[in-house]
Image (cartoon, rainbow, N blue to C red):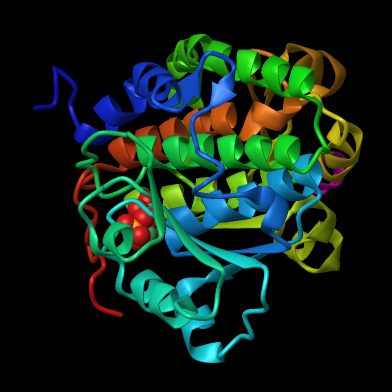
């Protein structure tokens, strides 16, 4: 049931405020995170290996920043189809964590089976609780996104981020890196996020206008730094899979190491840059793009727009958010941009060509 929306994807994007609130509620017990230490004791963990495919892989890349920054925990992230055939050593003290919406992705399941008997613990972050990946894990953490029908993952991505962030906060307090009071403050910000999601969804008309113009391009670049880099990758994947527009993402700092050669007035460049500690760096990359005639669509907040919005082709202004939470909020405009570009192109949004919701063959 599309609940009055034209596509399941539109419905699944729009329901994220309530889905996230519920998903968070399922893990919070007052101020404490409901993941028992008997199940996962971060004091005994030396490193994490995160493995997944596609959008779930980008959730893992985001989580690397969180686990490293908040919990000082070393993290490796890998694409399941690469990990499984490389015979990577899995050292004692490793927790292997697999992220999968369907819980049936063949490569992710094979990577999980490879880690059995090698890793100290197999943890999965899944949407389908009865799935193979959930069943074969020592600990399966549901993301509580509800059924996702659109082939392009949207609410599952934000709910995967939610569980991964909770795990990082749990690790940070268990390892004594983050005081309980700081964790409580961050959780309070997280509880407020559904309200900010609503404010982001209110920018729909502006995003649609930008998306219509972007839909005319042959190639689109996404740039981001820090936590916004995995999100740029996710934005590019979303755009290419449903609108069939060629889109690539780069870490902003990599621009001058090659991709800047692509820039001309026909290439829209989506810059994802909240006004955070890395903002000035990203803006200087953005200005390099503009100096070469590139058309920039800047996704930022009011402070960012005031500082750098001048002369920019399109500005999408989101509410300000704690910088550690920005990937969750900035996922929404990335999804809406792809959605509206696909609608403008008239593609089959919920069933894009050549793609399946669950990839059970490698
Ligand atoms: C992109 C998308 C895919 C999946 C990938 C992994 O929108 O949906 O990239 O994220 O196929 O699927 P799961 O999470 O089911 O393992």
Q: Is residue 145 left or right of residue 298?
A: left
Q: Residue at the spot x=37%, y=35% of the render? A: 155
Residue furthest toward the left? 1
Nearest the viewer among 70 and 278 is: 70
Nearest the viewer among 328 and 135 is: 135
Q: Residue 106 placed where, x, y %?
A: 30, 74
Q: Residue at the spot x=67%, y=68% of the render? A: 93
Q: Residue at the spot x=21%, y=38% of the render? A: 147
Q: Residue at the spot x=35%, y=28% of the render? A: 13
| Helix, strand or loop for the magenta stretch, by majority | helix
Above or below residue 302? Residue 71 is below
Q: Residue 211 placed where, x, y %?
A: 46, 33
> Magenta span has 292?
yes
Q: Quadrant of the C terminus?
A: bottom left
Q: Is residue 104 left or right of residue 141?
A: left
| Residue stretch in magenta | 287-293
Q: Is residue 264 in sight in this rendering?
A: no
> Magenta span has 134?
no
Q: Residue 219 placed where, x, y %?
A: 54, 56
Q: Is residue 297 in sight in this rendering?
A: yes
Q: Quadrant of the N terminus?
A: top left
Figure quadrant, ligand 1: bottom left
């Amino acid at each position: 049931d599309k609940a009055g929306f034209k596509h399941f994807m539109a419905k699944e994007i729009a329901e994220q405020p309530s889905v996230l609130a519920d998903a968070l509620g399922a893990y919070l017990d007052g101020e404490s995170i409901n993941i028992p230490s008997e199940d996962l004791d971060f004091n005994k963990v030396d490193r994490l290996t995160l493995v997944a495919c596609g959008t779930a892989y980008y959730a893992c890349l985001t989580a690397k920043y969180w686990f490293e920054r908040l919990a000082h925990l070393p993290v490796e992230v890998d694409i399941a189809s690469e990990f499984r055939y490389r015979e990577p050593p899995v050292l004692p003290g490793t927790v292997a964590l697999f992220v999968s919406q369907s819980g049936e992705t063949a490569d992710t399941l094979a990577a999980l089976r490879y880690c059995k008997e090698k890793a100290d613990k197999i943890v999965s972050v899944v949407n389908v609780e009865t799935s193979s990946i959930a069943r074969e894990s020592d600990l399966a953490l549901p993301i509580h996104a509800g059924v996702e029908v659109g082939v392009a993952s949207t609410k599952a991505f934000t709910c995967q981020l939610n569980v991964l962030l909770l795990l990082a906060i749990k690790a940070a307090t268990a390892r004594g890196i983050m005081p309980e009071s700081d964790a409580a403050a961050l959780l309070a910000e997280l509880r407020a996020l559904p309200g900010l999601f609503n404010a982001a969804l209110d920018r729909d008309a502006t995003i649609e206008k930008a998306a219509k113009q972007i839909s005319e391009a042959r190639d689109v670049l996404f740039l981001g730094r820090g936590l916004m880099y995995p999100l740029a990758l996710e934005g590019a994947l979303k755009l290419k899979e449903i609108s069939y527009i060629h889109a690539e993402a780069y870490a902003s700092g990599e621009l001058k190491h090659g991709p800047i050669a692509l820039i001309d007035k026909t290439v829209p460049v989506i810059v994802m840059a909240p006004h955070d500690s890395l903002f000035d760096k990203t803006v200087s990359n953005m200005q390099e793009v503009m100096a070469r005639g590139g058309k920039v669509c800047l996704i930022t907040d009011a402070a960012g727009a005031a500082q750098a919005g001048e002369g920019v082709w399109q500005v999408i202004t989101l509410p300000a958010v704690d910088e550690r939470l920005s990937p969750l909020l900035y996922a929404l405009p990335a999804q809406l941009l792809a959605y509206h570009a696909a609608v403008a192109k008239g593609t089959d949004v919920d069933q894009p060509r050549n793609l399946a919701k669950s990839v059970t063959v490698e």
